[in-house]
Image (cartoon, grey):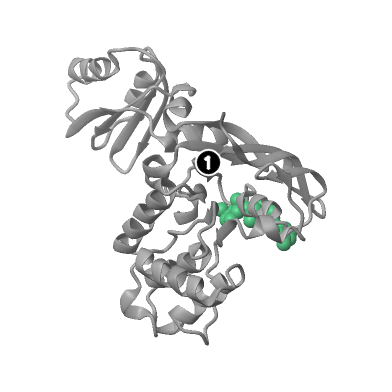
C-alpha cells in the first residue's frame, strides 16, 4: 500500500482580506517527485510554509508521515529538508561551516555529521569551494550551497521552492540530476518551478494551483489528455492579412488563432488532418509561407488552458 507522506486537507490561509489558500487539498505519496505549479501569487510558498508550521493558518489540517504537524514537532521536522525560494545562508560562515551548521540542527554526533557534510558537498559539486564564503560564490554555486544545507541531514521529505531560478545551465543540470538521485535513494520530493521542461523531466505527479485552489492534478500525460487542445499547427509566415486569419479560425477543429511576430499559431481540438487543412487553405489562396509544422500540447498549454496564464509570466 502506498504510504502518504503529506496530507493537506481544506487548508485556508488569509492575509487580512486576501485569501491566499482557499480550501486547498493535496496528498503526496512516498517516493514521488511532486511538482507544485502555479502562477505567481497562487499560494505555493504559503502552502510550503504552512506544511512546515512556519506560518499559522485559519482552517484545515496538515499531516506529515501520518501524524498531525505542529510547530513543536521537532521529531517530524528533522525528517524534512527544505530549500527555500530565497537563499538563506550565513555570509560570515564558509561553505563547509554553513552546511555543518544546518546539519547540526538535526545531527549532534560529530563524526556522523562530518560524513554527512562531506557527502552533501560532494553531492552538489562544491568540493573546490569548501573554504569560500557565500559572497564569493556565483549565483548557481550559491543555489547549490543552499541545497546542500537543506539535504545534508538525509531527510525523507525534501521541499524545494524554485531551486533553479536564475541559475546557469550547468548548475541547473547538476541540480536536476541531484533531485532525481535523491529520489532514487528514497526521498520524496516537493518541487515548485516555473520551468515546465524541468517539471516534465523530473516530476512523477503534478498539481496545478491557482488562486489558492487545487485546479488540476495528475501525471504530465494525464493533464495533457484532460484539456481541449490536442494539436497546435504553427506557421512561419509574413504579412498575413487579417481576413485570412478569420477564415482559418473557421476551419474545422480550430478554436483559436494567434498571429504575432510572423508566427501563426492555430490551436485545434480533435481532428486528424488539421495541418493538411491549413496547407490546403494556403494553396487555394495562393499564399506563401516559410515553414509549417504541428506540435502536441505542452504542459504550458495545459497551464494556459486551466489558469488562463502562462507558466512563463514571471520572466515576461
Ligand atoms: N506576508 C504576507 N502578507 C500579505 N500577503 C502575502 C504575504 N505572503 C504572501 N502573500 C500573498 O499571498 C498570495 C500567495 O503568495 P505566495 O508567495 O504563496 O505565492 P507563490 O505561488 O509562492 O508565488 P511565486 O510564484 O511568486 O513565488 C499572494 O497574493 C501574495 O501576495
Ligand atoms: Mg513562491
Q: Toward which corner of the image does residue 141 lie, by quadrant?
A: bottom left
Which residue, as the protein is rendered here, is positioned at the far bottom? Answer: 92
Q: Ligand 1 near label 1 (Cβ, under 8 Å)?
A: no
Where's residue 113, x and y in %? 50, 72
In the image: residue 244, left or right of residue 90: left
In the image: residue 112, left or right of residue 26: left
Residue at x 36% of width, y 14% of height: 251
195 lies above or below 94: above
Q: Toward which corner of the image does residue 280 lie, by quadrant?
A: top left
Residue at x 31% of width, y 44% of height: 261
- Give neighbour class at mark 1: few <14, some 14-19, many 20+ (Cα, 10 Å): some
304 lies above or below 269: below
Quadrant the C terminus occupies: bottom left
Where's residue 70, x and y in %? 77, 54
Quadrant the N terminus occupies: top right
Q: Quadrant of ligand 1?
A: bottom right
Looking at the image, which is closer to me, 242 or 120?
120
Instruction: Tell how many labels.
Output: 1
The residue indicated by pointer 1 is 309
237 lies above or below 228: below
Residue at x 47% of width, y 64% of height: 147
* SS type, badge 1: loop
Where's residue 9, x and y in %? 73, 38
Looking at the image, which is closer to me, 316 or 171?
171
Where's residue 36, x and y in %? 54, 44
Amino acid at each position: 500500500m502506498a504510504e502518504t507522506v503529506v496530507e493537506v486537507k481544506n487548508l485556508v490561509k488569509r492575509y487580512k482580506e486576501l485569501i491566499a489558500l482557499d480550501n486547498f487539498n493535496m496528498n503526496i505519496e512516498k517516493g514521488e517527485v511532486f511538482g507544485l505549479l502555479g502562477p505567481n501569487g497562487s499560494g505555493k510558498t504559503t502552502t510550503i510554509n504552512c506544511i512546515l508550521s512556519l506560518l499559522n493558518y485559519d482552517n484545515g489540517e496538515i499531516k506529515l508521515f501520518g501524524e498531525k504537524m505542529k510547530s513543536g514537532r521537532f521529531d517530524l521536522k528533522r525528517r524534512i529538508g527544505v530549500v527555500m525560494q530565497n537563499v538563506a545562508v550565513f555570509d560570515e560562515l564558509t561553505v563547509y561551516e554553513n552546511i555543518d551548521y544546518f546539519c547540526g540542527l538535526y545531527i549532534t554526533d560529530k563524526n556522523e555529521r562530518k560524513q554527512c557534510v562531506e557527502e552533501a558537498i560532494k553531492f552538489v559539486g562544491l568540493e573546490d569551494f569548501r573554504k569560500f564564503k557565500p559572497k564569493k560564490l556565483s549565483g548557481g554555486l550559491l543555489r547549490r550551497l543552499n541545497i546542500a544545507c537543506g539535504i545534508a541531514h538525509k531527510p525523507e521529505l525534501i521541499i524545494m521552492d524554485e531551486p533553479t531560478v536564475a541559475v546557469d545551465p550547468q548548475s541547473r543540470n547538476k541540480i536536476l540530476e541531484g533531485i532525481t538521485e535523491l529520489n532514487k535513494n528514497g526521498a520524496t520530493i516537493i518541487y515548485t518551478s516555473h520551468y515546465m521542461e524541468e517539471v516534465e523531466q523530473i516530476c512523477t505527479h503534478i498539481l496545478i494551483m491557482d488562486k489558492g485552489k487545487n485546479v488540476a492534478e495528475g501525471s504530465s500525460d494525464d493533464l495533457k489528455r484532460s484539456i481541449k487542445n490536442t494539436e497546435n499547427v504553427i506557421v512561419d509566415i509574413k504579412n498575413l492579412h487579417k481576413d485570412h486569419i478569420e477564415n482559418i479560425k473557421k476551419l474545422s477543429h480550430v478554436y483559436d488563432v494567434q498571429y504575432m511576430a510572423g508566427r501563426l499559431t492555430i490551436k485545434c481540438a480533435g481532428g486528424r488532418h488539421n495541418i493538411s487543412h491549413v496547407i490546403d487553405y494556403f494553396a487555394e489562396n495562393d499564399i506563401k509561407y516559410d515553414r509549417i509544422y504541428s506540435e502536441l500540447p505542452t504542459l504550458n498549454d495545459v497551464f494556459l488552458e486551466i489558469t488562463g496564464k502562462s507558466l512563463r509570466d514571471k520572466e515576461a
